[in-house]
Amino acid sequence: MIDARDIASGLRAAMKVGRPRIRYLLGGANLRLIEWLALVGRLVGREVPRWQVTYPLALIVAYASEWAADHLTGRMPMATITGVRLTRHSMHFEAAPSQNYLGLMRLHGFGKRAGSINRAWAIRILPNCCSH
């Protein structure tokens, strides 16, 4: 999870000191899914899901949800097959080498201040999460 302002700083730094054909990874905190859900929940004023389902059940729900979205409702599916598959494995990214090379430090976080700054953005961007 990385603040958009840190991405902007990283892009600026890559244009100044980056080398051609070299990829730079800009990143902030590595969060588990439940941590990410808690963060987004705080931003949009929603509670974290209270129960978990097994992977096979989540995959069945995703297949059914996508089928219903495609053939019945025309709306966005409640769960997607790709989304469920991505939860199967934890992914960790180490951005420190790129950020050190570019001379960056993580300036912004997703703490209390970011919650107030990003709430309006999250409500616009994540309307399905925010409808009460």
Image: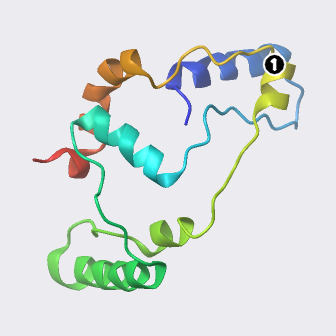
Percent x, y of residue 48: 30, 50
12 or 93: nearer the viewer: 93
Q: Tell whether 128 sits left or right of 132.
A: right
Q: Where is residue 113 in the image (x, y as percent from the top left)?
A: 38, 15
Amino acid at dot 1: Leu
Q: Which of 22 and 57 is in front in this view?
A: 57
| Residue positioned 43% across, 81% down in the render | 59
Q: Tell me which residue sits at (56%, 31%) in the image.
A: 2
In the figure, 36 relative to 25: above or below?
below
Specify how the rendered protein is coloured.
Answer: rainbow
**Residue ID for mark 1:** 102
Picture layout, residue 3 above or below residue 34: above
Residue at screen point 87% across, 36% down: 22
Please tell me in which quadrant of the rendered image residue 60 appears.
bottom left
* Neighbours of disc 1 within 10 Å: few (<14), some (14-19), many (20+): many
Determine whether 90 is above or below 108 in the image: below
Indicate the position of residue 58 as horizontal and vertical percent values.
39, 77
Q: In this view, does 116 lie to the left or right of 18?
A: left
For label 1, the SS is helix
